[in-house]
Amino acid sequence: MGYCLYDERGYVGDLASNYGLKLMSDYVTQVTNKPQVMKFFNKGYSPVTKELIAGLKAIHSPDKDIADTIDNLVNLLAKCDTVAIISDGTGIESPDLTIHRGTHEIGGSCVELCSNSGNTRLIIDIGMPLVNADTSPFDWGTHRKSTLPQLLAEKILPSVDGLYENDKPAVAAVLLSHAHIDHYGFLRFVHSDIPLYMSIGTKSLAEVSNVFLNTGVKFDRVKTFEMWQKFRIGEFAITPYLMDHSAPDAAAFLIEADGQRIFEVVPKNWTGC
């Protein structure tokens, strides 16, 4: 049975325990008279203070599982900023994550994050697949003359509401991890009112690739970011991190919203991904 510790920035760590949160709370409030410790377990949150940590350290349970849980909790509290929240996940809001493509194959990546309010939708990569459904090599040349509705009907393009030119735009932005065709090959179909975010190096490589591969990407709506510099798209705060990858200036992203943090690592250190 598990529950977790959060602070105002989001998830801090797991408190794996054979005791559920209610049983643990009942035990702690029976064996301590420290107001802040009791408040922490009764209300589920507390300022991180010396009194809270000292009160927890003063609990000496003969039950090894309880003792280990308290020790783990004290160690996690040291990582919190000003407020700690303990929860089994009930009532914790977090962004919705949808993998439109990329779970069963390499390439053709397309991931969506939607804020809990539903007001900000973010697409991470919109790549061309490397293989067909039967694992045979994907040949864009056989589909190049297909219309957008045909590509959607044939599932060449992932079905994402409000992303493409044939739909009313409902996506805040497309965030590109790196300039490999299996991660940006279908940018040409993204609605012209939706901005594209990418690193300076990714933009430069994609522009050169456009000359040779005719990717059809228009770069007048591109917004560039710098590594390790946080920026915002709607309700999402995004920090890009430089990745060791065969495409230069590739990025992974720390994405923060709704008090939660997601670290999205799209380009891994595998040549050709």
Image (cartoon, rainbow, N blue to C red):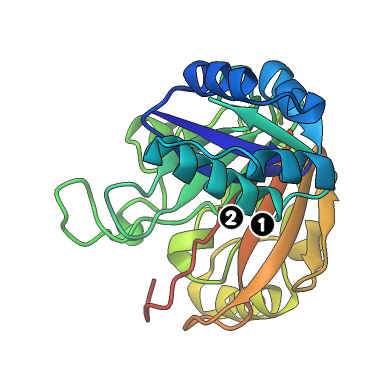
In this view, 166 is above or below 7: above
Assign a secondary structure to mark 2: strand
Residue at 45% of width from left, 40% of height from top?
A: 99
Residue 37 found in image quarter: top right
- Quadrant, the C terminus: bottom left
Instruction: Indicate the quadrant where residue 250 lies.
Output: bottom right
Residue pictured at 72% horizontal, 22% vertical: 38
Residue 237: where, in percent of width, then height? 79, 49
Judging by the rendered image, the residue that carries numbered circle 2 is 263
Viewed as shown, does residue 81 lie left or right of 70? Answer: right
Kindly identify the residue that appears in the image at 49 percent across and 73 percent down: 213
At label 1, which amino acid type do we have?
Leu
Q: Earlier in the sequence, mark 2 or mark 1?
A: 1
The amino acid marked with disc number 2 is Phe
Which residue is disc 1 drawn over?
A: 254
Instruction: Tell which of 205 and 79 is nearer to you.
Output: 79
Q: How many discs appear? A: 2
Residue 186 position within the rendered picture, expressed as x and y whole percent measured from the top left:
51, 53
Quadrant that contains the N terminus: top left
Front residue of this view, candidates 225 and 90: 90
Helix, strand or loop for disc 1: strand
Crowding at mark 1 (Cα within 10 Å: few <14, some 14-19, many 20+): some
